[in-house]
Image (tube, grey):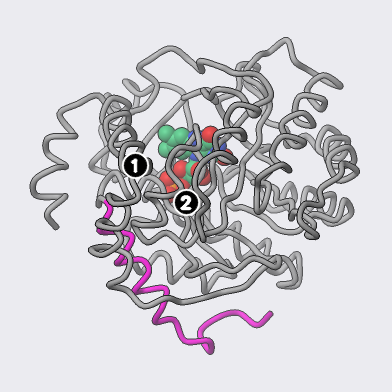
Amino acid sequence: MWYEKTLKPLLFKLDPETAHDMAYMLGKLASSSPAACHFIGKFAHTLVPDDPFTCWGLSFPNRLGLAAGFDKHGYLPAVLQALGFGFVEVGSVTALPSQGNPRPRMFRLPADRALINRMGLNNEGARRIVDRLIQAPAVQIPVGINIAKTHNPQILGAAAIEDYRVSFSQAVRFADYITVNISCPNTEEGKTFEDPEALSRLLTVLMAQPRRRNNRTIPVLVKLSADLDAPQRRELVSLCEEAGIDGYVAVNTSGLRKSLVHSSDAEIARAGRGGLSGAPLLQRSLDTISDLHSLTGGRKPIIGVGGIVEPSSAVEMRQAGASLVQVYSGLVYKGPGLVKQLRESLGTIRAESLPIH
Ligand SMILES: Cc1cc2nc3c(=O)[nH]c(=O)nc-3n(C[C@H](O)[C@H](O)[C@H](O)COP(=O)(O)O)c2cc1C
């Protein structure tokens, strides 16, 4: 409540990326101080009982994670653990560093509790970010690394696959799990990696890479777009299953604008192209999750993401078939207090209300 009454009005006066950068800077400072993390943990984390869950041989203290795109540079795991997240997905990281698209590239649509972004995979490059994660004090929560293709339209075909492979081999040095982001709508070439032939070649190469560390095989997940129709999902899931991937992240942002009902045409036009996230994504995210759950017979864990702004949406995601959930845009609208609310609602789900695995 304090966030919505006091901090949010101030932050919403700033350009969205500037507000994000300020929050990031504070998080980075807190992450570097064990005392600050301890203090934050006292107020946020320890007030909610744990809801432990084991998956891919990893222990999650609870099922709520921070989605990719918030901690692109890998500075925040310690403070995110203190805030009560049960896991974190760092990235997307790419083989080469990239500045991303020119600013402004992130926009709020408050009437719909949505964001539109075309960040363009800005990051410092996989090697540097993985080095940073390795050198940081260890955290107890699982840290995934999300990899994508470098934001450069000249990197195509076999070079694009090699680019992913480089990031993959870096990620294996640290990640508890690796998410292959094939669905970023903000690539310079304007195409995702969801073309079946391209995806098949990519997964053949990645799944043949060494991925054992400390006597465990690092699980590989694929992150799908919100904009796939049912036949496309069926085809891609069949390819992913053939390749032997370990799970799915559903969904990435959407290029469509149909679900925006409260924002004016002028606001939507001002934002321009980019991926839509936040509340309007929820239905597509739920549909994708339940489809994936039935396509895989409930045998592959799904991380559900997209449109969680209310605690009830996290519950719906679990009921659609997600084993774990992630949030990003909801935090912009509700602040860090949402973490506790989501954890409480996730902790109260009764097993009978979930789909059978
Ligand atoms: C500003 C911004 C940047 C993002 N960057 C990435 C990214 O680099 N890689 C990725 O896989 N997803 C990225 N995402 C997508 C989120 O991980 C998530 O899939 C999407 O926002 C839907 O969740 P939400 O409705 O809770 O925000 C980004 C989202 C936002 C809002």
- Please tell me whether residue 14 is drawn above or below residue 180 in the rendered image: above
Q: Label 1 crowding class (10 Å Cα cut-off): few <14, some 14-19, many 20+?
A: many
Query: Residue at point 55% right, 69% down?
Result: 320
Instruction: Quote the CA–CA distance across marks 1 and 2.
Output: 10 Å
Type of the residue with mark 2? Gly
Image spot of residue 248 (x, y percent): 67, 55
The numbered mark at residue 114 is 1
View extreme (left): residue:
6
Image spot of residue 337 (x, y percent): 25, 58
Label 1 CB-ligand 1 distance < 8 A: yes
Residue under numbered circle 2: 306
Q: Which callout, 1 or 2, points at the residue further toward the start of the chain?
A: 1
Label 2 CB-ligand 1 distance < 8 A: yes
Boundaries of the magenta span? 336-357
Query: Residue at point 89% right, 54% down?
Result: 242
Q: Helix, strand, or loop for circle 1?
A: strand
Image spot of residue 140 (x, y percent): 51, 60
Q: Would you say the magenta stretch is mainly helix, strand or loop?
A: helix
Residue 325 shows up from this direction:
yes
Classify residue 232 as left or right of residue 197. left
**Quadrant location of the C terminus?**
bottom right
Residue situated in front as seen by the camera: 277 or 263: 277
Q: Residue 157 falls in which quadrant of the image?
A: top right
